[in-house]
Amino acid sequence: MESRILAAREKVKPLGAHTSLGCLHEMKRWKDISFLRENEGMLPPFIICVGDRRRVLSAPTVLNFKNYAFIDQEAAKISPAAFGRVAMLVGNVNARGFNFPLAVIESQMGCPAAQINMREALYYTDNDRYQVGELGVHSDGIYVIRAGTCAGVNSHRKSEYRMKIGDIAIADKNYGSVGALIESILGTLSLEGFDARKKIEEAGKDVLLEPRLAVSYDSAYLKNKCSSRIILQLLGLSNELGILAIQGANFTKDSLYAEMDENRFAELRDTYGIISSEMEQMAISALAAEFTIAGVPAYSALVSAVIGAIPGKSFPETEEERKAAKKAEENTMVLACSALGEIARGLNQ
């Protein structure tokens, strides 16, 4: 029998099963997994998304989980076929004195992987209520914060703030030219005669509602927004926790090696105020808007650890730089967890 929650989500149903969660639902074995069995096989509405499974595995220590389960590892005990492709953690954390259920999920690298894995994760996420033992937490939607790593984007102008390894970037909007979104949302496989602005207008009001996808003022890039509600929490908490954070636009790219064109990135900083560049958030923001349009309220934002800089150096080289990058990665997790905790607290007072 299909879950009461999933029955209303036909418009956002994923293609196939790629995560342990999807596999467990296909096999009808989610009742064998702790946290899932009390919640119709669903994840909690508060999610931290990371690109690398190593950060999922370190989350219990970094975020001081009280009790937790690695869903993919538990699924592997049922059947190797249920392991899935990504690491997935669910548990109970205490953020600034408030207990709430939290999931940490690996999106993997790039918009195509994030679009596949996070669509499936959001599809199997309860946007209303979650039960962990005697603890029941309400929500008014799904909240997803990508705690990622990025390259800081710098200007050639000496008067501009210079992003450096160890900084924290909070994105308020995303720019990019993302093939996964051009193909899936705008419905084109060919760039012949392609006019992104015209395609978006033809797609109608549903695309424009959030907007799931828009075009930059000069028609050079696709564009979408991060959730202002989450951004305000991230900024406020960064001040309270003494974590320096810089707010600005993010650029989502398809290729890691695009960073070789350093002057082009400096132009992005000067033209659009872009301070960070990574490879997943535009797809996650688009997914959140798509779920919202389908009647499942979802909100997404990005907080990134700067582990390189363009122009400059793309990755840490010295021991001091590696330590600064590692500390920044931990700070993004702490900030994301604290922001989700404050949102959960506000919804349950």
Image: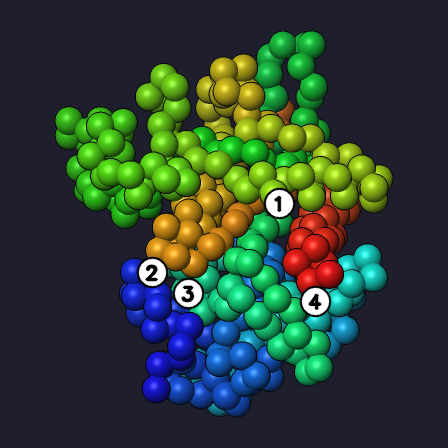
Q: Which residue occupies 50% across, 88% down?
A: 31
Tell me which numbered mark, 3 or 2, is placed earlier along the sequence. Answer: 2
Q: In this view, does 332 lie to the left or right of 47?
A: right
| Residue type marked 1 | Ile
C-alpha distance separating marks 1 and 3: 21 Å
Q: Is residue 273 left or right of residue 316?
A: left
For label 3, the residue is: 123
For label 1, the residue is: 230
Tell me which numbered mark, 1 or 3, is placed earlier along the sequence. Answer: 3
C-alpha distance separating marks 2 and 4: 26 Å
User: Which element carries disc 3, helix, strand or loop?
Assistant: helix
Q: Which residue occupies 27% across, 34% down?
A: 200
Q: Is residue 336 left or right of residue 127?
A: right
Image quarter of residue 124: bottom left
For label 2, the residue is: 12
| Residue type marked 3 | Tyr
For label 4, the residue is: 100
| Residue type marked 4 | Phe
Tell me if label 1 and label 2 are in contact, CB under 8 Å: no
